[in-house]
Structures are given as C-alpha cells and as structure tokens.
Image (tube, grey):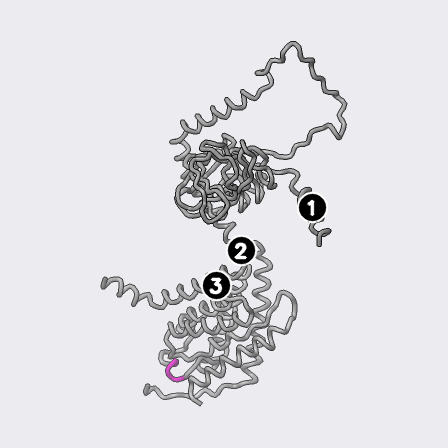
Amino acid sequence: MSTALKHIVRFIVFILVQVYVLDKVHIHYMITPYIYFLFILWLPFNMKRSVLMIVAFLLGITLDSFRHNPGFHAAACVLIAYIRPFLINLLIPQEGADTNYQEPSAKSLGGFGPYATYIAILALVHNAWLFLLEAWQFANLWYFLVKTLLSTIISLLLILVTEIMFTRKQKFRTNTV
Amino acid sequence: MRNIFFFIKVYFNLIIFLLLQAISIYLIVHYNRYHSAVTTAYLSEVTGKVNTQYNKVEYYLQLKKTNDSLVKANEQLYNKLKADFDLPDTVSKIVIDTMKLDSLQPYRKYRYMNAKVIYNSVAMENNFIELGRGATGGIKKDMGVINTNNAVVGIVTDVSNNYAIVMSLLNKDSHTSVKLKKSGEYGTVVWDGQEPNVLTLKEIRKSAKVVKGDTVVTSGLGLIFPYGLLVGTVSEIVPDKSSNNLFIKIRSAANFYSLQYIYAIENLKKEEINKLLENAKKKAQ
C-alpha cells in the first residue's frame, strides 16, 4: 500500500471512529473521549510543515462538519500540527533518526518515554485549546482545568489501547536518502 | 518589495498557522450565537474604555455648547414651574384630599436616567451611540433615548455591564412611530442613509394636511417613548407618484453632531403591557 493511500484510509477511519463510536460514548458530561488527532501525530516525518498544518485543518474541519459546529477542532488540530516539529526536534534521540524511520513511534523516537511525552503534550495542548475555545472565557478556571486533564487522561488511555491493538510495522530505512 | 518576499519566506509557516487559526476562530464566532454575544460584550467593554478617554478631551472642548444646551433645558423647566402661574381671583382653589385612594393616585409610567455619551457616529450607514452607563446603572435593552432638549435620539440595542449601545435615528434599521402634532396623522420615521439630521417620514396619506414647518412628535403608541417628544420639523413635502402616500423630509430636532448628555427612558409598565398583549394573542389563536 502506498503511503498516501495508507494515510487517506487512516483519515477516514479516524473520523468515522470518532464520529460514530466515541462521540456516542458519554462517560460523564465533562469528558469527551478524543482520539482522532492521533492521525496528525502519526503523519510522516518528511512532510512539510505548511502541508502538515493544512492536512490538520482539513481533519479538524471534517470533524467539525459532522458536528455542525465549524472551527473548534480545526483550530485545535492546526495548533498541534504547528508545534509538532518543535517537539520532535526536542525529543528525537540523534540526528538523522527521522530519516531512518518514516513516522513517529516508540521505536523511531528512541523508546517509550519520549514517545509518551510526545503524545501526552500534544493531547494536552489539543484538549486545552479546544475547551478554551468552547468556553471562550476564563470565567470557570477550575472546571476548565479538570475537564482538560480528565479528557487528556482518557485520550491517552485510548491511544495506548490503539497502539497495542494495531501495531504499526516500522521499517528501518538506510541513510541513503 | 524584496524584503517583503524575504519576510514571507522566513515566516511562511507562522503565517500559514496564524491564517488557519484565524479562519477557524472566524468560523467559531460566526456560527455560534453564544460566542458572538460574548465577543460583542467584551469588545464593547474595551472600546468603551478607549472611547471614555477620548471623550474626556472632546467633552472639554465642547463645554461651552453643552453648557448652552443645559441652560436652555433649565429655562424650559423653569417655565413649567407652578410658581410661574398666578391663579385669577375668580377661580376657586383646588384642594386635593390628603387621603390617598388607589384610583386617584397617579402612577409613574416613565422614568428618566441621565447618561454620558462617550462615542457617537454620524457618518456611517448605520450609526451608533455609545453610553458610559450600562446594566449596573439600570440601562436596559429597548429603552428610548432623548437628548437634553426632549428630542428623540434613538433606542438602546445592546447593554454590557458598564456601557450601552444606542441605535440612533440615523440608522437604516431604525423605525420610530410618530404623529403630526397639528393634524394628528400617524406615520413612521426612517433614515435613508444619506444626510445626517435629515430623516424621512413615511405612511402619511395624501389627504393629510401637512405644511412646511409642522412639528413631528412621538406617537406614544409603542412601549418605548411617551407621547409628545420632539422628533423634527417638516422641511420638504414631495407627493409620491407611485402610491397614495406623501414623501416627507423632516429635519431632526436632535443635533446628532453635538451630543454630550442624554436621558434614557424606562417604561415601568412595559412588562405589564407585554403580558396583557401576550394573553390577548393567546386568546385570539
């Protein structure tokens, strides 16, 4: 399967799972389980940053369209797509590792620790920006903080389950790119 | 020019990021009633603060004019004092019983509150006035607004905690129910968006006796203004060939160029009347 096709399939699957499975799950009125943004975290290393942001915007606006409430997820997705390269640069073990592997994973980032940090920070940023936009003010700070934290924990659990269930094959490529 | 391209090249990613965020936030504010309401309230608080500062300077420069208008208003009030009227000898003195009976006791229907104008526009298609008094000062939505000489200025449309927005008569959405003082014909005053201080009076039939210089006052039919507040004087009458109505231009009584103080009018019986109207509507259905 070509890389582009693989990502398009992922896009559709993530959106469908988010809209028709996770959005129907109501754990508590505070918590919405989010996982669709994992698509952005799995995009390949060699993607240009501007393209990354546009793809993220498309993902967000698609989900927004399903919810008939445009803007919220698009904004959050664009934000994590923007800070993703910074984070990868900080966490990547040695120079050139991003050319050895195709996309971020526990293997390519050199261990479970850095990969967990990568996922956790971006999930937190995504949820925080999303809920901030939904609240549109700082009136209820505790509610906002608790909601963000709980939703992020649920997101991380979901991502962990996904990683275990669907192991991605990570081919080691030689440095001759 | 080369520098601009260089700038775009260096900050390309940041520009794309900000652009996409801006689009998202525009969509959020545009499609969500709650978000746009909060934004409007917040923005009017901010612009209110800036406008207050600016108005302090402008107010000082216009002190003389303001003073003149206040003197005029005082003069009007002095002329209404009871002490100015001597009763002729032949008339017997009227004594009102000090015991109050419900049926005789007059009730207050309108209350006036003064407010400072901190921003005022006349040059746009839809003009607004901003007041330095808001919900905490008792200003509510749909209150009528007049200037110090009892001339109609507009209607309150938005209220935040400390500021209020008034849609002035110089606004295309403004419709005021009025009456010709002399002949008693009812009509509607609107603005065509062209000349400040010149309004249009609609819905007066050709059979009505209208002369140049006639006074136009509020009809008192709506719940917003009491009867008899000045709106303007007739300045031009054109028969409308396509309909049975006259096309009348009136000069507004309020000078929108020099507003400093206004009074907001609260109709204290509004809720009661609204309730009654709702009941009547329910019965009619």
State which chain disc 3 sits on. Answer: B
Q: Amino acid at mark 1?
A: Lys
Q: Is residue A143 shown above or below A74? A: above
Front in this rendered view, residue B106 or A174: B106
Mark 3 Cα-neighbour bin, 10 Å: few <14, some 14–19, many ≥20? some
Instruction: Kindly report the distance in space between the C-alpha atoms of the residues bearing marks 3 and 1.
Output: 38 Å
Let me know if residue A99 is in the magenta part: yes
Residue A119: say if magenta: no
Q: Quadrant of the N terminus of chain B?
A: bottom left
**Dot 2: what SS?**
loop
Viewer-side label of 3, 1: 1
Type of amino acid at the residue the image marks with label 3 = Leu
Give how far across and how far down residue B113 sits, in percent. 56, 34
| Label 1 to label 2: alpha-carbon separation | 35 Å
Label 1 Cα neighbours within 10 Å, binned few <14 / some 14-19 / many ≥20: few
Indicate the chain on which mark 2 is placed.
Answer: A
Q: Which residues are magenta?
A: A97-101
Is residue B54 in view from this perspective? yes
